Amino acid sequence: MIEVSHLTKRYGEKYAVRDISFDVKDGEILGFLGPNGAGKSTTMNILTGYLSSNEGTVKIDGVDVLEQPLKAKKNIGYLPEQPPLYPDMTVDEYLTFVFGLKQCKLGREAHLAEICGLVRIQNVRGRLIRNLSKGYKQRVGIAQALIGNPDVLILDEPTVGLDPKQIIEIRTLIKHLSRKHTVILSSHILPEVQSVCERIVIINEGRIVADDTTANLSSQISTDHRLIARIAGPENEVRDALSELTGVRKCVSLGEHEADSLDWQIECDAGQDIRRALFSVLSAKEWPLLALDTGELTLEDIFLRLTTDSTVLPAKRTAADNTAEETAPEQQGEDDNA
Ligand code: ADP
Ligand code: MG
């Protein structure tokens, strides 16, 4: 359905994307994952025909986006990072306006009613867009992408800036939409694409560093067992007790994050679940366990693994190909996109 081949985009001397190739099959839901500045929006703007590339081609259902932009665009619904909403229009006025812009041939009333029902904005159709919450604005953005019933939906960071409840609603909506559309969804948050997408392309500094099924990538990521435990107990004794647990490869103190306690990063052998043994030893010593986290790899950890010691990356490269570097776990899902 979507064939991206050797895309390159430069701004002056700087490469925003560099020799990117991937395919998306009919009906697939693909996660396009990368940190801010990785080149996600640039790629999506090229895919949708809003930006030209320096090199490479994009075909949507066999139609070249550069050669036949109008024909290709008819098949694409696009939600850009900044949805093109007109705050002074009502939802209905806006959707009618977009319907006209897209020269949509479907019956207008019925089509707009169907879309509003699907994205659940029926109750705000008469309201001014500027008075809507961020979550509703995002739904209106998705609604405009759905006008004309395109086969392909391209959604650029659709959950950025939403609160947790809105995020879940939008994710559910996207999953629902993927039944009838081929979807590409970008995000800088790993769990987001893990929860929604079947396949993940990871991009960093304009290059693809991994392209695999979510299941494969997730299993590679989770074979590395790592726990973060916040323990109130004397440092040296805790270290000794943790090190003696069967299956513990290494434990490192991450310092004090809460008064009178230390955070410990505990690395375990693959397949070893030490949580029960950990509970028993801490409880026997009467050292309270204040928090326990699975400490999954953050996006930063993953990039490090995928990109260390290499300048030329093959298109398909897996986390298992690389040896791990020591990194402190960082807060994931941070949103500095505002
Ligand atoms: P992402 O969407 O993954 O955050 P972008 O595609 O927006 O990344 O940006 C990729 C890189 O290209 C960044 O380094 C960004 O600063 C640069 N860039 C994007 N747009 C422009 C532009 N119009 N002019 C110059 N540099 C740009
Ligand atoms: Mg972006």
Image: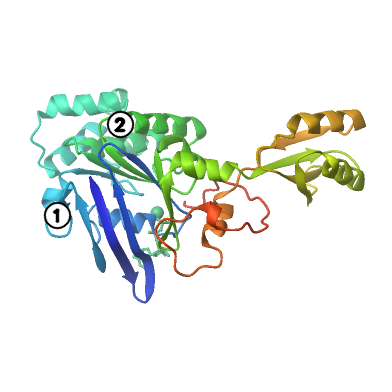
Picture coordinates of residue 171, whole percent (x, y): 41, 33
Q: Residue at the spot x=27%, y=23% of the render? A: 117
Circle 1 packing at 10 Å, graded few (<14), some (14-19), many (20+), is some
State which quadrant residue 294 falls in: top right
The amino acid type found where label 2 is placed reads: Leu
Residue 133 can be seen, yes or no: no
Q: CA distance from mark 1 to mark 2?
A: 24 Å
Mark 1 sits near ligand 1, with its Cβ under 8 Å away? no
Helix, strand or loop at label 1? It is: helix
Q: Give coordinates of residue 243: x percent, y percent.
A: 83, 45
**Amino acid tagged 1:** Pro
Give the left or right position of residue 2, taking residue 298 as reference: left
Rendering coords of residue 269 (x, y %): 70, 43
Ligand 2 visible in quadrant: bottom left
Secondary structure, mark 2, is helix
Where 243 falls versus 278 (above or below)? below
**Nearer-the-camera pick, 59 or 135:** 59
* Viewer can see residue 19: yes
Residue 200 falls left or right of residue 139: right
Query: Which residue has dot 1 on it?
Result: 69
Please tell me which residue is depicted at 19% across the width and 39% down the height of the picture. 150
- Counting the numbered discs, the total is 2
Q: Which residue is mark 2?
A: 177
Image quadrant in which you'd find residue 279: top right
Residue at figure coordinates x 35%, y 49% from the top left:
82
Image x and y of residue 302, in percent: 55, 53
Q: Is residue 77 left or right of residue 306?
A: left
Residue in front for this viewpoint, 25 or 97 = 25
Q: Is residue 80 above or below residue 20?
A: above
Could you classify mark 2 by the number of other residues whose Cα lies within 10 Å: few (under 14), some (14-19), or many (20 or more)? some
**Horizontal side, residue 71 vs residue 156: left or right:** left
Classify residue 148 by image quadrant: top left
